[in-house]
C-alpha cells in the first residue's frame, strides 16, 4: 500500500524567510496530493493541492511542486509570517481510495 | 470554501458512559464522510469511512461495536463512543467529501476533544 514520508519533522525559520517541506510517496498510482495546515487544537485546513497532470501550482505565498518521476512533492511558503506557524500534513491519494497522510511537520516562524 | 462543523468541540465524561459526536457539512452534500483519531503530536489515523445510507467501513483494529457510526443524511454523520474508557481520550476529527465537487477533496471539521475520566 501507499506510504508517505515527510521531512523535516520540525522546521524553524525567521519571519520573512522561505520554508520548504518535502514529501515522498511510494505508490505511483497516486494522483492527488493535498496539503493541510493544522493549528493547535483545531482541525486540518486544506491550503493547496495538486494533481498528477500538473507540475506546479501557486496561490499567493504558497506553492506546491510535484515530481512524479521521483515520486515527491513539496510545499513552499515564501515571506513567512508568525501566523504560518502550525503543523503541516501532506497526503497522497489514489483516486477512489483513502488519504494516506505524512507524519506532519511542525513549522515555527520566529519573529 | 466548504465548511464542516463538529459538535461538541470538547467533552468530558465518566468512564462507562457513551458520547455522541456530530459532524455536519454546512454548504454541500457529503456523500462520504470520514472519522479520524489523532493523538498528541501524531498524524491523523483513519478510523472509518461512512457513506450516506449504508454501513460504515472500519479500518483494521477499530472496534465497530465500540465506535458506532451513522450517516443518516447527506449532511450529517455521527460517531458514538460507547462505554468510553480513559484510553479512548483523544482528538476526534471528521471530514467530508463534496459529492458535487472534486471527488478527492476532503474538508475537515474543527475536531472534538474527548476526555474520559
Image (tube, rainbow, N blue to C red):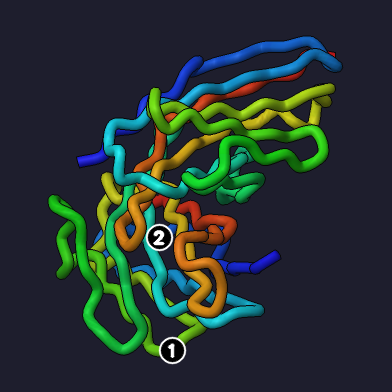
Question: Quick check: B106 above or below A20?
Answer: below
Name the residue: 28% across, 31% down.
A26
Nearer to me, A100 or A95: A95
Mark pair 1, 2: CA separation: 27 Å
Q: Are marks 1 and 2 in contact (CB under 8 Å)?
A: no
Q: Position of residue B10 (x, y in %)?
A: 53, 57
Name the residue: 47% across, 67% down.
B103
In the picture, the disc for residue B65 is none
Residue A94 horizontal side relative to residue B30, left or right:
left
**Residue A81 image-quadrant placement:** top right
Marks 1/2 same chain: yes
Q: Position of residue B36 (x, y in %)?
A: 38, 54
**Residue B35 image-quadrant placement:** bottom left
What residue is shown with label 2? B13
Residue B34 horizontal side relative to residue B58, left or right:
right
Residue B14 horizontal side relative to residue B111, left or right:
left
Name the residue: 44% across, 69% down.
B21
Question: Quick check: A17 above or below A47?
Answer: above
Q: Chain of mark 2?
A: B
Q: Position of residue A68 (x, y in %)?
A: 42, 32
Q: Nearer the viewer, mark 1 or mark 2?
A: 1
Under circle 2, the secondary element is strand
Under circle 1, the secondary element is strand
Q: Which quadrant is home to the N terminus of chain B? A: bottom right
What residue is shown with label 1? B73
Q: Residues within 10 Å of mark 1 (few under 14, many from 20)?
A: some
**Residue B18 image-quadrant placement:** bottom left
Amino acid at each position: 500500500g501507499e506510504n508517505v514520508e515527510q521531512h523535516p519533522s520540525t522546521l524553524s525559520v525567521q519571519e520573512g524567510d522561505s520554508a520548504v517541506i518535502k514529501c515522498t510517496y511510494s505508490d505511483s498510482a497516486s494522483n492527488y496530493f493535498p496539503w493541510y495546515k493544522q493549528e493547535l487544537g483545531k482541525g486540518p485546513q486544506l491550503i493547496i493541492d495538486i494533481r498528477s497532470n500538473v507540475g506546479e501550482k501557486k496561490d499567493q505565498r504558497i506553492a506546491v511542486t510535484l515530481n512524479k518521476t521521483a515520486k515527491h512533492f513539496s510545499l513552499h511558503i515564501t515571506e513567512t509570517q508568525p501566523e504560518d506557524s502550525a503543523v503541516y500534513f501532506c497526503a497522497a491519494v489514489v483516486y477512489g481510495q483513502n488519504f494516506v497522510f505524512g507524519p506532519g511537520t511542525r513549522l515555527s516562524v520566529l519573529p | 470554501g466548504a465548511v464542516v462543523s463538529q459538535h461538541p468541540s470538547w467533552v468530558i465524561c465518566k468512564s462507562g458512559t457513551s458520547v455522541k459526536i456530530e459532524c455536519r457539512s454546512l454548504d454541500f452534500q457529503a456523500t462520504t464522510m470520514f472519522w479520524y483519531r489523532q493523538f498528541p503530536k501524531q498524524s491523523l489515523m483513519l478510523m472509518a469511512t461512512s457513506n450516506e445510507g449504508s454501513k460504515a467501513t472500519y479500518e483494521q483494529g477499530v472496534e465497530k461495536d465500540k465506535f458506532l457510526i451513522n450517516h443518516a443524511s447527506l449532511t450529517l454523520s455521527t460517531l458514538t463512543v460507547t462505554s468510553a474508557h480513559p484510553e479512548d481520550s483523544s482528538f476526534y476529527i471528521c471530514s467530508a467529501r463534496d459529492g458535487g465537487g472534486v471527488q478527492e477533496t476532503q474538508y475537515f471539521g474543527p475536531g472534538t476533544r474527548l476526555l474520559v475520566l
